[in-house]
Amino acid sequence: MNTIDLNSVNYLLLRKQHLADDSHVDDICQITEDIAGLHGTGSKEPYLALFARASNFSKAQLDHELYISKTLGKVRCMRGTLYILTKKMIPIAYAATSVMTEKLSVRFMELRGISLSDYDGIAQSILAITAGKTKSLAQIKAKLKTEFNLSAVVNLMCDRGLLIRIQSGNSWRTRNYSYTPFHEHFPDVDLAAFSESESTALLVQQYLQSFGPATEEDIAWWIGSSKSRVRESLEKNKKLIVPLTIKDAAGDFVILRSDLERIKDSQRTAEPEVNLLPTLDPYLMGYKQRQRYLNSEDYNNIFDRTGNVTSTILLDGRIIGIWDYAEKPKPVMKLHLFRKVAARLLEKIYIRAQQLGHFIAEQEVTVREVSAMTPLTQRTAGGYMSPLRDG
């Protein structure tokens, strides 16, 4: 049995996740594939996740790849969560998770008084309205003149691969969507290319490339699958993986053989690696067991009661504090560190905060520390989006 220390694991993961300074690249499609997708639930978060990983990133780059080059797309998949994926990964994730996501959408729709027979007629009308065009929900409603909850219908249509979400408006912060037929937007993407079994095995392999080493429980949680399905997929990938023990981390881990040599050769960089990650960042949402990157006493300040992770400050892959951005009365980046750090490290954190604040505000921002925060587990729903609101 191979045994590796936790620091070596985290140094490897920083590079795999493009979070080490020497692992940043310009190609945001490569980053998206290497980290198994960007969380797309929030509007700003994908841009901030790429800013943390890319050498030179502008907001227009992501919009270009999503809506002009169409190399990336936004679909619901793992755990019923909205993700931005590469075209290569979309049919894999879709086939592995569509049964689960459709079930959630059907339940959501039926709770709003729409039967599947109602849905069939409405869906055909929406496809006719959006053919060759992109339409917002408001425009679809105006055309159909129906009292039905069309939001629930288009959700199911997206989950069945009939429509795809297109972010509308001119702001990277907008949460509004327009919709267009999936086959028109991605004519060369075949959602029926893989069986559920084949796609799950490929998705498990992709997960290990992006997040391994990991436990069976981590993989099942990330996909939103049963452990038995994951176990079958690991068996199909058995020639590619080996078991692993991690010092100071409980559980039975597996790692790709190709990563084993990399992890043994993984060296700590001369300078500490400092990252400011957004809420729901893929690196932090990749695991069920999170002891690898946090101290247990800090957990309630980092995750809320439903498991959403807030905006964090990392040192060498471990969380040491929280950051927040406030726009009024003047743009400010707030920092809350769980423990005191050396002056030189604090200076580096301030520099990173100023850079991130400038990216968000598109102007110079003030950086200041906040001495205390209310634990997220004591906050109302959505508190993780503004963790230092009271500071």
Image (cartoon, grey):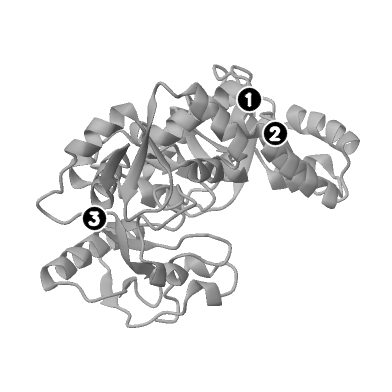
Question: In the image, what residue occupies the spot 75% across and 46% down?
Answer: 152
Question: In the image, what residue occupies the spot 81% across and 28% down?
Answer: 124
What x and y, as percent, mark residue 95?
61, 27
**The disc labelled 1 sits on which kind of residue?**
Glu
Dot 2 or dot 3, earlier in sequence = 2
Q: Which residue, given by chain and number where applicable, does mark 2 sit on?
A: 99
Q: Which residue, given by chain and number where applicable, does mark 1 sit on?
A: 196
Distance between the alpha carbons at the discs numbered 1 and 2: 9 Å
Dot 3 or dot 1, earlier in sequence = 1
Viewer-side residue, 100 vs 295: 295
- Secondary element at tag 1: helix
Viewer-side residue, 123 vs 98: 98
Determine contact: label 1, label 2, CB under 8 Å. Answer: yes
Image-quadrant location for residue 154: top right
Distance between the alpha carbons at the discs numbered 2 and 3: 38 Å
Bin the neighbour count of mark 1 within 10 Å (Cα to Cα): few under 14, some 14-19, many 20 and up: some
- Secondary element at tag 3: loop
Does 304 appear above or below 236? Answer: below
In this rendering, position of residue 38 left or right of residue 221: left
**The disc labelled 3 sits on which kind of residue?**
Asp
Determine contact: label 2, label 3, CB under 8 Å. Answer: no
Distance between the alpha carbons at the discs numbered 3 and 1: 37 Å
Residue 316: image tag: 3
Dot 1 or dot 2, earlier in sequence = 2
**The disc labelled 2 sits on which kind of residue?**
Val
